Image: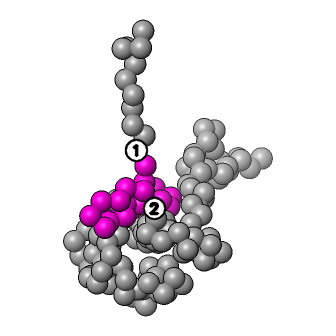
Amino acid sequence: MEDKFKKVSKKTDKQIKNNQFIAHGRRKEAVARIKLYKGKGDTVVENIPIEDYFPGEVYKVKWQKPFILTNSSNLYYASIKVKGSGKAGQLDAVVHGLSKALTYADSQYRPILKRAHLLTRDPRVKERRKYGLAQKARKGKQSPRR
């Protein structure tokens, strides 16, 4: 009876090999896979520098926030793969993933990032469309005039 069942290893986020920390960040339909490395280097998203992938000052402030809060901007760099959603959703997924990866790198960062709500996955997603309504989730059909 025992030989029928295989032991399946549970895949976890916290994979550490060759000084790299792997984490996933999510927001809406976006999923970001983060590989955080110790040392100095350029953070890239889909092999494009992060400053070019997320252009503008508002985006820059947002993705740098985990590094600024933990004073670790010169200690780590990341390679990021992201898919799904739009740029804003992808950016939030990247920030969530970077925060998780930083906590794997150093557990002292966890309370700082938790207080800033960067480790919490934002549960807001698009509401599904209900039948009997118009095109949207809550928009009703117009009733005929009498």
Left or right for 84, reference 130: left
Query: Residue flagged by tag 1: what amino acid is it?
Result: Lys
Left or right for 40, reference 11: left
Query: Residue flagged by tag 2: what amino acid is it?
Result: Gly
Question: How many numbered marks have been drawn onto this rendered protein structure?
Answer: 2
Q: Looking at the rendered structure, which numbered label has been put on residue 25?
A: 2
What secondary structure is the magenta-colored segment mainly? Answer: strand
Left or right for 39, reference 118: left
Element on which disc 1 rests:
loop
Q: Residues within 10 Å of mark 1 (few under 14, many from 20)?
A: few
Res 126 → quadrant: bottom right
x 36%, y 79%: residue: 76
Closer to the chain start, of discs 2 and 1, is 1
Q: Is residue 85 visible?
A: no
Find residue 17 and report its horizontal and vertical position in percent.
30, 60
The front one of 89 and 96 is 96
Q: Residues within 10 Å of mark 2 (few under 14, many from 20)?
A: many
Is 24 magenta? The answer is yes
The residue range painted magenta reads: 12-35
Q: How is the image coloured?
A: one colour
The front one of 83 and 121 is 121
x 57%, y 45%: residue: 129
- Which residue does the numbered mark 1 point to in the structure image? 11
Asked whether disc 2 touches disc 1, contact meaning CB atoms under 8 Å apart, the reply is no
Residue that protrudes farthest toward the top in the picture = 1
